[in-house]
Amino acid sequence: MKTEQLKTALNRGTFAPVYLVLGQESALIEEVRALFKATLSTEEMTMNFASYDLAQTEVARALEDAESAPFFGERRIVFMQNPFFLTGEKVKTKLDHDLKGFQAYLEQPQPTTALVIFAPYTKLDERKKIVKQLKKMAIVIDVQKINERQVQQLVTAQLQSEQVTIEPAAMTLLLSKTNSDYSQIMAELPKLLLYAQQSRVITETAVSALVASSIEDNVFELVPLVLQKKVGPVLEMYHDLLLQKEEPLKINAILLGQFRLLLQVKILFEKGYSQGNLASVLKIHPYRIKLALQQIRHFSKATLAQAYLGLEGIEEKIKTGQGEATLLFELFMLQFATDDVA
């Protein structure tokens, strides 16, 4: 079930006794929370709503609440958060979760309770009896991460509901700056809607000025400086990222990914792939492909490969404890700047 289908069902007053909200798209998760809460009045929220974090509270306590009859209302709504025991993840905990009791509840759930289980995971451990029982009994609400096309459709629909349009170039930039992350876009949208309050149009200028750059965007700005072997500016920007509390391993991983992309684009472009084909084959936003094609124009495969292998070497050394991350990057940059590669 998608969130729109859930909204329609709840508006009709149609409830299931158990729901499983499965996925990691935070904006959709918050939408599901709001939809359930909206079915209760302010007075009912006080008496007939409860939320339990199963990373801190035993499941038996949540089930006791779920088994209770509603007070002065037709229905209780009980949220269960972070049911880590549904996954294959090993978690150290002092909690003693009564999973047999949970299974027994699923076999005969309280009909006047909507038990909503939020599982912010990509998948569950299908081998576990409790997972099999839950999926058999529950209405599964899909809140997995959505692809770029779906993101664009949802954002466009949201803007249309606000009677606002967005320029094609602005949409492209918005997707690029947020890496097509729906939740991040929805967090940025209020600022853009405020900007467009009078004009009813979101422009590329507005997106550029109002939407915060991700670490990926910041690291992306490092790439041409590295390729041009500008040691001073590279290290200055690198240390600025560290001051912003970015992890060296994360910075290196993003840089490594960027150089992997440049190398792939270089090889495929020389084999005759067009910009459109590259975006399709590599499953990368066309805007990123366009920038990559601009960057590789003046650099050989050997130079790109040298940078890629150097960054890969840093990652391996960091993970195996063979050196301090910042020093490793500085040494890589100095070495890369002094080596001549055909």
Image: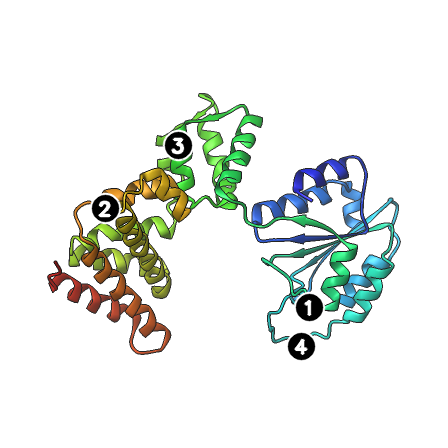
Report x, y in % for residue 297: 20, 45
Q: Is residue 256 left or right of residue 86?
A: left
Q: How many circles with numbers are drawn on the protein?
A: 4
Element on which disc 1 rests = loop
Q: Report x, y in % for residue 164.
A: 50, 25
Disc 4 versus disc 1: distance between alpha carbons? 23 Å
Sequence-first disc among 3 and 4: 4
Which residue shows up at 38% across the image and 43% down it? 279
Dot 2 falls on a residue whose secondary structure is helix
Q: Are marks 3 and 4 in contact (CB under 8 Å)?
A: no
Q: Are marks 4 and 1 in contact (CB under 8 Å)?
A: no
6 displayed left or right of 337: right
Residue depicted at x 80% and y 70%: 100
How would you rate the neighbour count of disc 4 (Cα within 10 Å): few for under 14, some for 14-19, many for 20 or more? few
For label 4, the SS is loop
Q: Secondary structure at mark 3?
A: helix
Q: Which residue is mark 3?
A: 170
Where does label 4 land, which residue? 94
- Specify the amino acid type for callout 1: Arg
Q: Which residue is mark 1?
A: 127
Of marks 4 and 1, the one in the foreground: 1
Residue 92 sits in which quadrant? bottom right
Disc with the residue nearer the chain's start (3 vs 2): 3
If you read the primary sequence from the N terminus, does the residue marked by circle 3 or circle 1 appear first?
A: 1
Report the Cα–Cα distance between label 3 and label 1.
46 Å
Residue that mark 2 sits on: 295
